[in-house]
Amino acid sequence: MEFTTGGRLEVRISPDDVGKRVSVRRLAEAGSPGAKFTDTVGVLTSWDNGVLWITRRSGEVVRIAESTLVAGKVVPSAPARRRGPAATFEELARAGARAWQPVESEPLGEWLLRAAGGFTRRANSALPLGDPGMPVGVALGHVRDWYAARGLPAYVQVATGAEGTQERLAAELAHHGWSREVTAQVRIAGLAPIGDLDSDVSRVALHRECDAGWLSRYQRFTEPGPHVLRVLESGPSVWFASVAGEGETPAAIGRCVVDGRWAGFMAVEVDPAYRRQGLAGAVMTALARRALDEGASAAWLQVEADNEGARALYDGMGFATHHSYHHFRPA
């Protein structure tokens, strides 16, 4: 990281740069091992009373005392994307919302409150894609009340790490005492290479509805009530994949929602007894080929940041991280 101009370290940022992506160097905390300086890169989300708040791509908010700064500069709003189709954050966020629709929703300005009986955080969280029409602190009070009336915990889904994402909102949530519970990566890839994978798709069956067998393999609920089916079967063009195993429970399953140029992949699960047999790849390939037949050309999926096995699988298929999203919950 290079900060020098004519051999000198310079602080070339000010409170006027709030909202911009910056790179800063500060004195390391006393007693910290290693280097004398610490570098931080992210969006400058606040600079008040001698304290800077910088939100990293990961969603982590870093508090920095102005007195410890030794260098700082504004950097490009997002790093160059190395591969994958062109996509904006909002385009992907809206495609993701259409592919996983709640049972009940209500607008709060340009935020959307979503509920589905507690089945998954995605379907039971506020999706902020603009101005709530009131101060954020007031909006968060409405969010808490709306979910409390339904007997649900309050969540807000916030994205970081790409141009146009919501680092400033993440920092405001942190200031109001909300904390991150889960972080996931939104990954994108070209669809044709997935459809061209050398996978044995002969065992993969595709259906328009999720039957009892498919549901018995899916691990995200305890009781498959009607609210679960409403979410799973929602979307513009929904496909369910399954690979037969022993008995009525499939060895592997998957779900794909085709929506214009996008194919969204979800719920790819393999019975532990059948892993390392290429079944996840076969499910993805079969669904990709069907999506290509319907005119899609790009793929997206979401994977939790700590799911190393799934991330390795998707790395091999050409998926690259576009941004991350986080679910914030009040303390």
Image (cartoon, rainbow, N blue to C red):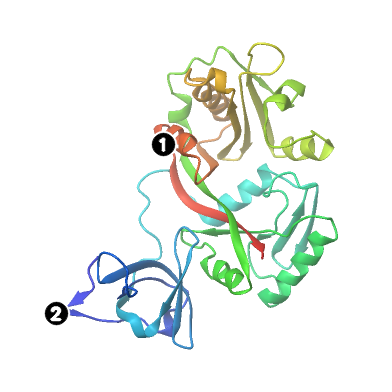
Q: Residue at x 35, y 81 (%)?
A: 13
Q: Residue at x 53, y 16 (%)?
A: 201
Q: Residue at x 73, y 27 (%)?
A: 215
Q: What is the crowding at mark 1: few (fewer than 14 residues within 10 Å), some, or many (at least 20)?
A: some
Query: Is 237 above or below relative to 46?
Result: above
Kind of residue indicated by mark 1: Asp
Which part of the image, by quadrant, shows the N terminus? bottom left
Q: Which mark is residue 6?
A: 2
Query: Is 186 above or below relative to 72?
Result: above
Query: Is 47 above or below relative to 81?
Result: below
Kind of residue indicated by mark 2: Gly
Q: Which residue is mark 1?
A: 315
The spot of residue 129 in percent (x, y) is 63, 62
- Residue found at the far left of this picture: 7
Q: Residue at x 70, y 39 (%)?
A: 235
Q: Quadrant of residue 219?
A: top right
Direction from residue 181 to residue 75 in the image, left or right: left
Q: What is the crowding at mark 2: few (fewer than 14 residues within 10 Å), some, or many (at least 20)?
A: few
Q: CA distance from mark 1 to mark 2?
A: 41 Å
- Residue found at the far bottom of this picture: 49
